[in-house]
């Protein structure tokens, strides 16, 4: 039997990565953050002095997406309540903090809207999923949790469980700001309105783009996390996995 697949999609800062990581930790499944791939391609372009919003640079960015080597390493904790950490490597260099800066966040949706970039990332993500899922999880059955925007619709269309996380954009902005502050990567003077506007702009781009736009798969379960704690979200998903296993 193939590993149990959990697809988690939703708008920016809806708690996807935190939830997905904790679900993976609870179940002994692997975890793949697909947003990190688009962030790496964006960082690669910016470091080469390419302006991602300039449409004439699309083929150069697509070449970079193909040639870049992207690696993820998630360290799970033995305590179920502590947060696993994911390190991201671009051509062997640890870029975990660099890919979360405001500059990368600002340009990433333009990069993710380029069709050939998506094809290159899709290939890399599927390859990674195939290797990681060949190792058996602690649960006795290998499993995989992936989060992003098109996991349930494109990357894992036959996932055993699809979750679509939503939350009020103000709540999401507050959570993102707290997360940035906690990790020490909050930029001076950054306020909740700015973060909220940036999230809304990014969601709009992600929803309206031609290439695999952000949308809830028909068979996805929608979970509104505006009034849920992280533990509550994780419990709800873990229970749903047990029901379907
Ligand atoms: O999840 P995260 O916020 O890190 O994703 C950054 C950006 O990457 C998103 O705003 C979206 O434009 C893009 N993305 C995507 N498809 C995915 C994951 C991320 O288009 N599966």
Image: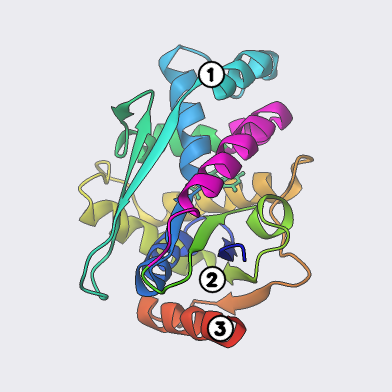
Left or right: 28, with 107 as reference point? left
The residue lying at 46 percent from left, 50 percent from top is 132
Q: Mark 1 and mark 3: span between their CA atoms?
A: 38 Å
Q: Secondary structure at mark 1?
A: helix
Q: Is residue 74 magenta?
A: no
Q: Nearer the viewer, residue 31 or 18?
A: 31
- The circle drawn on residue 167 is 2
- The circle drawn on residue 178 is none
User: Mark 2 against mark 1, which lies toward the viewer?
Assistant: 1
Earlier residue among tags 2 and 3: 2
Residue 22 location, x and y as percent?
37, 68
From this viewpoint, which residue is outermost toward the front? Answer: 1
Give the image quarter of residue 216.
bottom right
User: Mark 2 against mark 3, which lies toward the viewer?
Assistant: 3
- The circle drawn on residue 67 is 1
The residue lying at 51 percent from left, 28 percent from top is 41
The residue where tag 3 is placed is 240
Q: Secondary structure at mark 2?
A: loop
Q: Secondary structure at mark 3?
A: helix
Magenta residues, as a range?
A: 109-137
């Amino acid at each position: 039997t193939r590993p149990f697949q959990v697809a988690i999609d939703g708008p920016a800062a809806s708690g996807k990565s935190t939830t997905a990581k904790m679900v993976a930790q609870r179940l002994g499944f692997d975890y793949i953050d697909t947003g990190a791939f688009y962030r790496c391609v964006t960082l690669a372009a910016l470091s080469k002095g390419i302006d991602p919003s300039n449409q004439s640079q699309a083929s150069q960015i697509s070449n970079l997406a193909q040639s870049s080597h992207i690696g993820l390493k998630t360290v799970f904790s033995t305590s179920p309540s502590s947060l696993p950490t994911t390190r991201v490597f671009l051509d062997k260099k640890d870029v975990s903090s660099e890919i979360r800066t405001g500059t990368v966040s600002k340009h990433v949706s333009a990069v993710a809207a380029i069709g050939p970039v998506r094809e290159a990332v899709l290939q890399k993500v599927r390859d990674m999923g195939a290797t990681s899922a060949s190792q058996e999880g602690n649960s006795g059955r290998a499993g995989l949790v992936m989060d992003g925007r098109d996991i349930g619709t494109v990357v894992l269309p036959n996932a055993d469980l699809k979750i679509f996380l939503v939350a009020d954009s103000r709540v999401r902005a507050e959570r993102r700001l707290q997360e940035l502050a906690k990790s020490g990567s909050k930029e001076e003077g950054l306020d909740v309105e700015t973060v909220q506007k940036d999230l809304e702009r990014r969601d709009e781009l992600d929803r309206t783009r031609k290439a695999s736009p952000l949308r809830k798969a028909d068979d996805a379960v929608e979970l509104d996390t505006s009034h849920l704690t992280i533990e509550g979200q994780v419990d709800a998903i873990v229970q749903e996995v047990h029901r379907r296993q």
